[in-house]
Image (cartoon, rainbow, N blue to C red):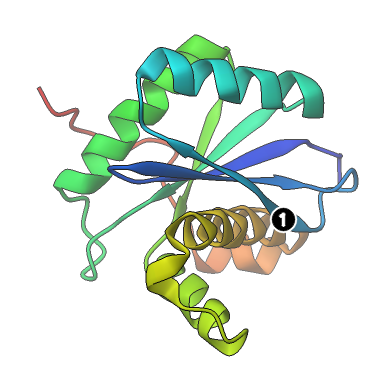
Amino acid sequence: MEQTSALGLDIGHKRIGVAGCDRLGLLATGLTTLKHTSFQDVVAQLAALARERQVQVLVVGLPYTMNGEVGKQARRVQSFARRLSEALNLPVEYVDERLTSFQAEQMLLSEGRSPSRHKGLIDRKAAAIILQQWLDQRVSPRSRQSAPLPDTVSGDPE
């Protein structure tokens, strides 16, 4: 297994949860939460993280509908991710992010924290879950075969 440095992104309307992985590419950890101020600000912050961590790929959570379909939100995320990919000159890979925010909220509750008071932390934890799924798929060929995801999703919003 080759080593890869990746950033996991949970892209939402207001915030972007960001996660990174260890040098071996085995463990994902939440790093920060970015606010959607402007696209240029987001790019500048992610570019700094990418340089610092020598990132080779962006792993983006794609919010499929519960039926597994590509909906409006998934197309919006994919469009934003493509723009990030071009601006940062990094490839993007997608991971099914259904229920990652719910999982992150449950983690907070188990820690005795209020999800409503820790939205940024939820976003970071969700990004870590997304990145961990991707890392686990790279380690286990069986995982890759059982849950294939397209590299791209057709249909950009106009």
| SS class, disc 1 | strand
Residue 70 in the figure: left or right of residue 16: left
Say if 91 sits above or below 142 in the image.
above
Res 89 quadrant in image: top right
99 vs 153, nearest the viewer: 99
Q: Residue at x 44, y 52 (%)?
A: 149
Residue 122 percent coordinates (x, y)? 49, 63
Residue 45 in the figure: left or right of residue 34: right
Residue 145 percent coordinates (x, y)? 57, 63
48 vs 117, nearest the viewer: 117
Type of amino acid under label 1 = Thr
Residue 147 percent coordinates (x, y)? 49, 64
147 vs 129, nearest the viewer: 129
User: What residue is disc 1 on?
Assistant: 29
Neighbour tally class for label 1: few under 14, some 14-19, many 20 plus, Cα within 10 Å: many
Res 125 quadrant in image: bottom right
Q: Seen from this angle, which residue lies furthest front? A: 117
Res 111 quadrant in image: bottom right
Q: Residue at x 48, y 76 (%)?
A: 103
Q: Residue at x 48, y 55 (%)?
A: 123
From where the camera sits, is residue 85 visible?
Answer: no
107 vs 130, nearest the viewer: 107
From where the camera sits, is residue 32 visible?
Answer: yes
